[in-house]
Image: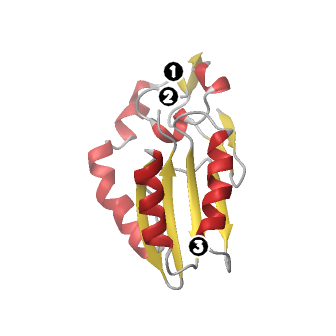
Amino acid sequence: MGSLEGSRHFDVVRTPVSGTITLTNDRLRTEPELVNRDPYGEGWLAEIKVRDEAELGLLGRLPNAAPLISQQIRERNVRCFAAFPDYELFDIGVECAAVLAKLNELLGNSQAGTVVHIVSDDSSAEIEMQRWADQTGNDLLESRKESLFYHFIVRKKS
């Protein structure tokens, strides 16, 4: 049906059934982030006129897929974030204050809703990121430590 390309990912989108594409979501041309932010709503890709209705019976239902997806996440040790990042800042060996300066610059040139993944090894990062979120009004969506690194997901306020 098509392809999706990002800064760190490329993938082919296959149709779940055979048929003809009758409508595409033109909004995705200017707002591709909708695919990640709202895939079952505003981020839909296409409408398909199904060639063989019997194929629909082969499709699973989303609620039934949840346990299977959860099992694969556990087995593959996947770490999902609260929101898919538009940008990433990896600043290892740098004080959090310097990271926040870069973050402020990035968000200053970004639209509302932009999501950034920050990775830091500064032991003060958790406190500094919370302070930053409180002062700026931006959303600190997620904060976690894995091994020696702190991971943060932030979203620019609306």
| Residue 5 numbered tag | none
Give the side of residue 114 with respect to residue 128, left or right: right
Residue 47: give its label: 1
Label 1 vs 3, first from the N-terminus: 1
Callout 3 amino acid? Ser
- The span from disc 1 to disc 2 (Cα, nearest Å) is 8 Å
Amino acid carrying label 1: it is Glu
Pick the front one: 120 or 7: 120
Q: Could you tell me if residue 140 is visible in this image?
A: no
Q: Is residue 106 visible?
A: yes
What SS does tag 3 mark?
strand
Mark 2 crowd level (few <14, some 14–19, many ≥20, 10 Å Cα): some
Q: Residue furthest left?
A: 63
Which quadrant: the N terminus? Answer: top right
Nearer mark to the viewer, of 1 and 3: 3
Which mark's residue is nearer the viewer, 3 or 2?
3
**Residue 53 or residue 21, whichever sits in front:** 21
Residue 44 image label: 2
**Residue hosting label 3:** 120
Q: Earlier in the sequence, mark 3 or mark 2?
A: 2
Q: Which residue is drawn at the image coordinates 63% and 74% (left, top)?
A: 95
Q: Secondary structure at mark 1?
A: strand
Q: Residue pushed farthest top?
A: 22
Q: Is residue 30 left or right of residue 122?
A: right
| Label 1 Cα crowd, 10 Å radius (few <14 / some 14-19 / many 20+) | some
Residue 153 vs residue 30: left or right? Answer: left
The residue lying at 51 percent from left, 68 percent from top is 151
